[in-house]
Image (cartoon, rainbow, N blue to C red):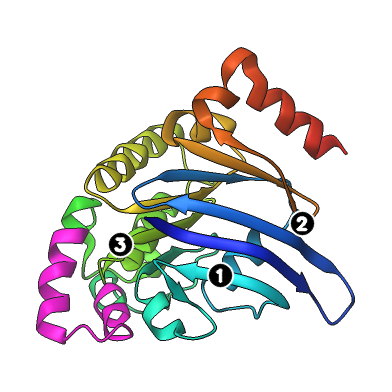
Amino acid sequence: MNAIEIKDLVKVYKTGTKALKGVSLNIEAGDFFALLGANGAGKTTLISILTGLVNKTSGMVKVFGHDIDKDFSAAKNFLGVVPQEFNFHMFENVQDIVVNQAGYFGVDYKTALHDAEAILKQVGLWEKRKAMSRTLSGGMKRRLMIARGLIHHPRILILDEPTAGVDVELRLGMWDYLREINRKGTTIILTTHYLEEAEQMCRNAAIIKQGEIAVQDSVANLTKDHKLEKIFLDIIKK
């Protein structure tokens, strides 16, 4: 079964900018999928449409078979999102940020409190649960974003540049954690500028250029003879 089905997706902004030009893309359930592209290529617009932040101009998007036009409330419950920018309340404590997020998805407080403990322990933030989020290091804030995205147990986790600005040691630790939740069945969609991250983590990948899918293949095929690196460098230069 496909976790995500996208067909002929078009987005034209009011300014006339055509951000997506008929994108078609299928992502299988349980995949660890990389979406690569230069800034302005259309990655953020694509993710924003998936998550309901931006309205599409035309085309079809389904999340586990639920058309976002017909039943977005059902579709959104499958999605957990970790945006690139920190967008939590800086004067809330870590535990409250995670628990309150669960409430947006209809999770009752007692269940959310129980699940938050398990998730915060998994990401190494349990000892910081009462700390104001503004006091956390950059790496800890990243882990808090992931915990918040996972609190309602989504079947799809979307990660937008999750290790940007994170040191190498912490990045490797995050990779291990993401591999583990993927092994347990969570479909992960990763946008990244780090080719090494895509090569090490993902099974399939697509490169988007100027609103169109330039190439899509398994990472195994794309990494033969440094093919992925050559394609990516060629695309972002143009």
Kind of residue at badge 1:
Val
- Please give the residue where the numbered disc 1 appears in the rendered image: 61
User: Where does the image place residue 15, in percent across and percent down from the top left?
Assistant: 88, 78
Tell me, yes or no, whether the highlighted magenta stretch contains residue 102. yes
Q: Give whichever of discs 3 and 1 has the lower sequence position.
A: 1
Residue under circle 2?
A: 211
Residue found at x 75% / y 71%: 11
**Residue 99 is a magenta residue:** yes
Is residue 126 visible from the viewing direction of this image? Answer: no
Q: Residue 145 is drawn in which quadrant?
A: bottom left
Residue at 10% across / 72% down in the picture?
Answer: 114
The quarter of the image holding the N terminus is bottom left
Label 3 crowd (10 A; few <14 / some 14-19 / many >=20): many
Position of residue 164 measured from the top left corner of the image (x, y, whole percent): 54, 47
Magenta stretch in the rendered image: 98-119
Front residue of this view, candidates 238 and 66: 66
